[in-house]
Image: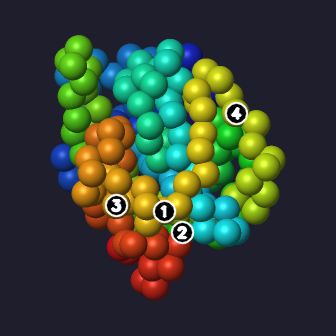
């Protein structure tokens, strides 16, 4: 896998199996093909959730509040390794206790300008052992907040807090405390 503009994403058939690759820079448009991604919800040792606001320069959903980290595994890269890699790149920290909490999450969303996200996107929860150690990549993350998960979840589900489309759907599917899901599936 290469980084930056040459980063490749894994294209998927409707059955979720890999059918090829494409440069990430060319994938997101009005006819975005189904591709592999992931989302991660990061918690600190006190149980607070790391809410992030996407950089204003992002191609999809710029400036929108969302889960802690999103990304695309490269060809042949285990998703859990991709989670660690992207968290290091975007947030400048390491994770512990990475757990798969929504293995089959899939969504399609359309921005006002017609750009489509179309992803099979397994969802993970993990712990950031030192919440003060974040080093944000400004090309990816505009700002962050450590928030109470229950209050955030209630704000999204009951009050309609504005978050990315995938985050809203994931929050609705996640347990009240995704860190404590016994079988790894909310």
Image quarter hosting the N terminus: top right
Q: In this rendering, would 35 be left or right of 184? A: left
Foreground mark, 4 or 2, reads: 4
Q: Is residue 140 above or below residue 101?
A: above
- In the rendered structure, which disc, 2 or 1, sits on the residue that comes first in sequence? 2
| Residue under the image location 59 percent in, 44 percent down | 145
Q: Kindly identify which numbered label has been placed on residue 136.
A: 4
- In the rendered structure, which disc, 3 or 2, sits on the residue that comes first in sequence? 2
Residue annotated with mark 3: 154
- In the rendered structure, which disc, 4 or 2, sits on the residue that comes first in sequence? 2
For disc 1, the neighbor class at 10 Å (few under 14, some 14 to 19, many from 20) is: many
Residue annotated with mark 2: 99
| Residue under the image location 36 percent in, 40 percent down | 163
Foreground mark, 4 or 1, reads: 1
Image quarter hosting the C terminus: bottom left
Mark pair 4, 3: CA separation: 27 Å
Labels 4 & 1 near each other (Cβ < 8 A): no
Residue annotated with mark 1: 149
Look at the numbered disc 3 and give the secondary structure of its residue. helix
């Amino acid at each position: 896998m290469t980084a930056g503009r040459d980063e490749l994403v894994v294209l998927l058939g409707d059955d979720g199996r890999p059918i090829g690759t494409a440069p990430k820079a060319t994938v997101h448009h009005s006819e975005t093909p189904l591709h592999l991604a992931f989302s991660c919800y990061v918690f600190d040792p006190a149980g607070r959730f790391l809410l992030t606001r996407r950089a204003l320069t992002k191609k999809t959903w710029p400036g929108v509040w969302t889960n802690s980290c999103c990304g695309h595994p490269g060809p042949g890269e285990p998703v859990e390794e991709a989670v660690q890699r992207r968290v290091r790149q975007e947030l400048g920290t390491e994770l512990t206790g990475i757990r798969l909490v929504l293995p089959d999450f899939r969504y399609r969303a359309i921005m006002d300008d017609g750009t489509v996200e179309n992803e099979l996107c397994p969802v993970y929860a993990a712990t950031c052992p030192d919440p003060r150690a974040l080093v944000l990549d400004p090309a990816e993350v505009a700002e962050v907040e450590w928030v109470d998960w229950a209050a955030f979840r209630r704000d999204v589900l009951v009050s309609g807090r504005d978050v990315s489309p995938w985050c809203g759907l994931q929050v609705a599917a996640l347990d009240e405390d995704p860190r404590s899901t016994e079988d790894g599936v909310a």
